[in-house]
Amino acid sequence: MPLGTTFEDELRRALQLRRIQQGTAMLRSAEGELAGIDPQTANAASLLLLIAQWVDVGYRDHSVLDGLLARFPNCARKTLSVQDYLRLRMVEGFCAFSSGELDRAIGTLEFVLRAQRDLPDEALAALAHFWKGRAHRKKGEYEASLVDIASAREFAQSSRDPIFTAVIQIQESWLLFQKGQHREALRLLAESESVLKATDHWIALGNIESARGRIVRRAGEYDEALEHFIRSIEIYARGDPQHVNLARALVNCASTRRLLGHQIRRKLDSLAKSRDSASAMSESAGAGTREALRVRHQQLYDSALQEVERAREIYDIHGHRDGIGNVAFTLGYLHLDLGDIDRALTDAAEAYRIGEAQNDHILMARARILSAAIENAHVEEQIGEGVDIAVHAANARQYSDEAWALALSTENRRLLAGASIARGMTAANDFFQDWELAQRCAAEATSLCGPGENDHLIEDLAALKTRVMRAWGINDRLRGWSEGFVGSKTFQQITEEFAEIVIPKVWLREDKKVSRVAACLSISPKKVRRILRNAGLVPHN
């Protein structure tokens, strides 16, 4: 079908109904003519914006737009109508977003929104807010993102576009998830899926499964999370086996397998501790269990390494630097777990360099948290001479401080909690043993963790608190208080610390019954649960 009004109308209709296979086939059959679009082409700006939207739903990538935009120099744009000029700027904003130039994308899309504020084109406004909200989200600016995404949804609803509304709600769901509203996030995903399941919009359907995986993973349900990620991989692969969203799902799969590996490692450690007290009769059965767990542990890490390498291949095809940075970050943790500290440090450095080049503070902070963990591993394992240990300890402090500063520049509370835990673990390492700072960091991280979270971050926080409690010593603290040594603490702070010592002990004595503890100490069950959650003894829910 030659380019023209009929072609554009049919292509637009296919987009509105998310008939992805039909629209992609139309675009591929017309690629020769589309490559020749210039200012003399009828409805050129409108057609370019339509192609950009198709790129967003899975047709090729933003590079197809770069060459077309080059055909519209400033001198040619002077003759365009205001609406066509704004459409071209929209395409530029989308290309900037797709290539990781987030500030330029936000500025360009904000210009479009301001320019048409008095006489708004609801469809254009919905799209501009949608793309701008995603750019803010990628920067970690979640409040600004939620404002734009909500505006996009309202404009789409006003335009009576239920399918685009459902697509927007997937983004809204993720932002509510970041705010700790897990049930509402899952409700929105189910609502979106009910609309989109009649389409072949594989990117959106894959995104729904991926988002579900992220939500249940944060609740500590790693097996269920893995199932969601595997389903998302299958959906993406059917649409495009080289798509960047498939690579992202592979990285999520690998990360989840790593967390499952941690659970198995803890089981193995527990079995090792109990082996000495085991009877000779049960020793053989215990050995079989341990071997099965070791095999499963190795399988999980082998699969994870394969998944991140496959993700890197896909990201390399697209030159997707952010994705390659996340691959390096994930590989770093896998190599650290497997004891390859040198490779882990190289991975962390690569992730940081990519984040710095992209001005991606989230990736930079994560890379520094990983680097601090690696340097602390050097300290804990006493690798090298005494002077080397001091260097590793100093590096850990520098990296954890940098991670905290970078995390503060975002609105990612989980990133802040992770950075605070990294600072606490550094303060509590064998070199510094700064228990005051470690305790402050643990309290800080606790305040940043939300309800319903029961994943690796909560486990890391519990490990930090346990380390502080064991090393600092309850008796020393009680003795100091009895002698009036309270430092700069207020009476309320001392009371709270005392409760954190006493309540877990009473809870254990009272058969782990919150109601008994509350009755015994004449305090509210709510406070008992809060103290136990903070101590990592019961899940956040």
Image: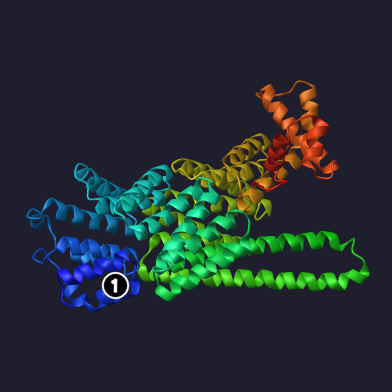
What residue is disc 1 on? 23
Q: Residues within 10 Å of mark 1 (few under 14, many from 20)?
A: some
Q: Residue at x 14, y 71 (%)?
A: 4
From the top left corner, tell me how far across and down residue 96 is, in percent.
29, 56
Q: Residue at x 68, y 37 (%)?
A: 435
Hey, which residue is sitting farthest top in the picture?
484
From the top left corner, tell me how far across and down residue 311 is, in percent.
46, 69
Can residue 309 be seen in the rendering of this structure? yes
From the top left corner, tell me how far across and down residue 350 is, in percent.
46, 59
From the top left corner, tell me how far across and down residue 313 is, in percent.
43, 72
**Image-based side of 239 in relation to 430, left or right:** left
Could you say which is closer to the camera, residue 103 or residue 336?
A: 103
Could you say which is closer to the camera, residue 354 or residue 432?
A: 354
Image quarter for residue 443?
Answer: top right
Say which quadrant the N terminus sits in: bottom left
**Image-based side of 130 in relation to 193, left or right:** left
Image quarter for residue 254?
Answer: bottom right
Amino acid of disc 1:
Gly
Tag 1 secondary structure: helix
Image quarter for residue 171?
Answer: bottom left
**Image-based side of 181 in relation to 114, left or right:** right
